[in-house]
Amino acid sequence: MGDLREPLNELTACGLPEALEVMGERWSFMILRASFNGLHHFEEFLSELGIARNILSNRLAKLVEHGILDRQPCADDRRRIEYRLTAKGFDLLPTMVALRQWGQKYGSEVVEDPVLVDEEDRLPIGPTSILSHDGRILGPKDLRFVKRGDLGLRADGTRAKPAAGFDRASGDGFPRIAAVR
């Protein structure tokens, strides 16, 4: 196994606590799932999810506050409000798919229906995986936490050449999670 140890008391240098603050409870992901399924209105969320009105109101406000959803008047009826996924919200799709696949694998023995497929060939997507900057599938033994200044520095002291489009300074694209076939 790689070195997945990191300073656990340095919460400010880790995105996980912030992500959990925004998305770390059931209803936030259920609202996100409903948004990906085309629901946009408070009453739609209320009837489809079976969530209490006050909890729905609170979660929608939190998702808007954190930029996951955008709250705007409906184009056809300015008195109605709709909630739309933002780019930040769309970026949660791989996380939602990974959690769904994990739940299917380790949760109930109920066979999932409908099945998430590739639109091109209508075959089920593969399991979500962690990809390197150059597209290799990585497992726990391949991973290690390093300081940002040491990105690309190999154990032998040489520098790795990043794939085209990889920005070492920002860590853009590192790591990526993707469904693989």
Image: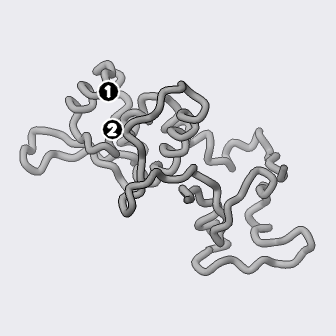
Position of the C terminus, as image quadrant, is: bottom right
The amino acid sitting under disc 2 is Ala
- Residue at coordinates 28% horizontally, 21% vertically from top-left? 53
Task: Please state the horizontal and vertical placement of residue 89, each as a whole percent of the image.
Answer: 41, 49
Mark 1–mark 2 Cα distance, whole angstroms, equals 8 Å
Q: Are marks 1 and 2 in contact (CB under 8 Å)?
A: yes
Task: Please state the horizontal and vertical placement of residue 92, each as a whole percent of the image.
Answer: 47, 49
Which quadrant holds residue 57?
top left
The amino acid sitting under disc 1 is Leu
- Residue at coordinates 40% horizontally, 33% vertically from top-left? 30
Task: Please state the horizontal and vertical placement of residue 85, each as a whole percent of the image.
Answer: 33, 49
**What is the crowding at mark 1: few (fewer than 14 residues within 10 Å), some, or many (at least 20)?**
some
**What is the crowding at mark 2: few (fewer than 14 residues within 10 Å), some, or many (at least 20)?**
some
Q: How many marks?
A: 2
Task: From this view, report whether residue 135 is shown above or below residue 94.
Answer: below
Of all residues shown, which one is farthest toward the left?
A: 77
- The residue carrying mark 1 is 49
Q: Which mark is residue 99?
A: none
- Residue at coordinates 37% horizontally, 39% vertically from top-left? 114
- The residue carrying mark 2 is 34
Task: From this view, report whether residue 29 is shown above or below residue 138.
Answer: above
Which quadrant holds residue 129?
bottom right
